[in-house]
Amino acid sequence: MGLDWFLSGKEILIDDTGWGDLILGVVIGALKLPERRYMERRIPVSSFQSPNFEDKRYLDDAVKIGEEIVEVMHPDKETRFKVCSGYFLFSMRALVGILDSGR
């Protein structure tokens, strides 16, 4: 059973890793299917240090990465977004929710 069995149509899957990584920061990856086009970007450790952490700069960085994903991946009206359900990407889910409803 391949990955295609779990997916329907055109999708962009977005997930994060490294929430507790003190060296490299957080990696956000996006996979566009069915083309299997992949990209990743990092939120630097500095976004999790004072005063940026208190200002939740990492959330702003996640939205900027989400905007870049949309720009690079060129989703059409049939493309659906699936974004990780964790706290870290909640602002990105709001961004792609607006995109999904506006197309």
Image: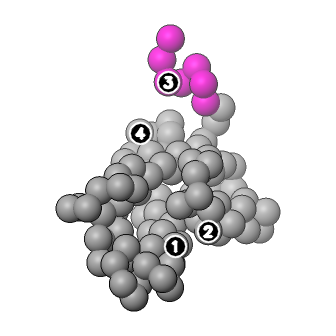
Q: Which residue is mark 2?
A: 91
Q: Quadrant of residue 58?
A: bottom left
Q: Which residue is mark 3?
A: 3
Cα separation, mark 1 vs mark 3, equals 29 Å
Name the mark nearer the viewer: 3 or 2.
2
Magenta residues, start to end: 1-7
Q: Assess whether mark 1 and mark 2 are in contact (beta carbons under 8 angstroms).
A: yes
42 or 78: nearer the eye? 42
Q: Which residue is mark 4?
A: 36
Residue situated furthest right in the rendering: 101
Q: Secondary structure at mark 4?
A: loop
Residue drawn at 73 percent across, 68 percent down: 98
Cα separation, mark 4 vs mark 3, equals 11 Å
Where 36 falls versus 86 (above or below)? above
Percent x, y of residue 3: 50, 24
Cα separation, mark 2 vs mark 1, equals 7 Å
Residue situated furthest top in the rendering: 1
Q: Amino acid at mark 1?
A: Leu
Residue 2 shows in the view = yes
Q: Which residue is mark 1?
A: 59
Sooner in the amino-acid sequence: mark 2 or mark 1: 1
